[in-house]
Image (cartoon, rainbow, N blue to C red):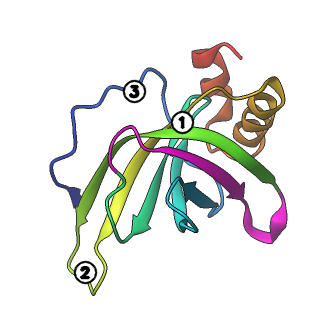
Amino acid sequence: MVITDKPLERRKRKRLKLVCDAVAFVRISRPDCLMVARIIDISHHGLTIRHFGEELPPHTLLELDIVLPGGEAFLSELPGVTIWDAEIDSEARGHYPTRQCGIAFRNLTDAQKSYVQSLIRHYSRNNQNEEKVDGY
């Protein structure tokens, strides 16, 4: 798959893949707008999701709930903002385009930061390197 029109990479920290399929429930300011998305990668500062449907414009404020299979971990009401959103080039497009979106966490509480750190430590493929890079 190739992402078209994706902005130049500007991440400050390395993102890590999770060892399981995690889901993000994304709520945006539009009334009753809830989107379900697959988490592609995560860091202490943000994540990338894959979703269907409309573009999430840059600077869109949102809240995320992160759920792991079997309910092993649940992080709720994580505030964030979209950085970029791009359609993914795919042979099986169907009715709704598949999109990928970069989201930065914003104004996390100390408890939320701790939960994100714990999620990365327990469920990422390369957690030791992330802790060294971020210094958490």
Residue contact between numbered discs 1 and 3, judged by CB atoms under 8 Å = yes
Residue 106: horizontal and vertical position, in percent?
58, 29
Residue 119: horizontal and vertical position, in percent?
75, 42
Residue 121: horizontal and vertical position, in percent?
75, 36
Q: Residues within 10 Å of mark 3 (few under 14, many from 20)?
A: few
Q: Give above or below for 48 relative to 70.
A: above
Residue 58: horizontal and vertical position, in percent?
33, 41
Residue under label 2: 93
Q: Give the Cα separation between the discs numbered 1 and 3.
A: 9 Å
Task: Please indicate, yes or no, whether residue 1 appears anywhere in the rendered image.
Answer: no
Q: Give the Cα separation between the discs numbered 3 and 2.
A: 28 Å
The total of numbered circles placed on residues is: 3
Image quadrant in which you'd find residue 111: top right
Image quadrant in which you'd find residue 36: bottom right
Secondary structure of the residue carrying tag 1 is strand
Tell me the magenta residue range: 57-72
Q: Give the Cα separation between the discs numbered 1 and 2.
A: 27 Å
Secondary structure of the residue carrying tag 2 is loop
Mark sitting on residue 11 = 3
Q: Residue at x 28, y 31 (%)?
A: 9
Q: Residue furthest left?
A: 5
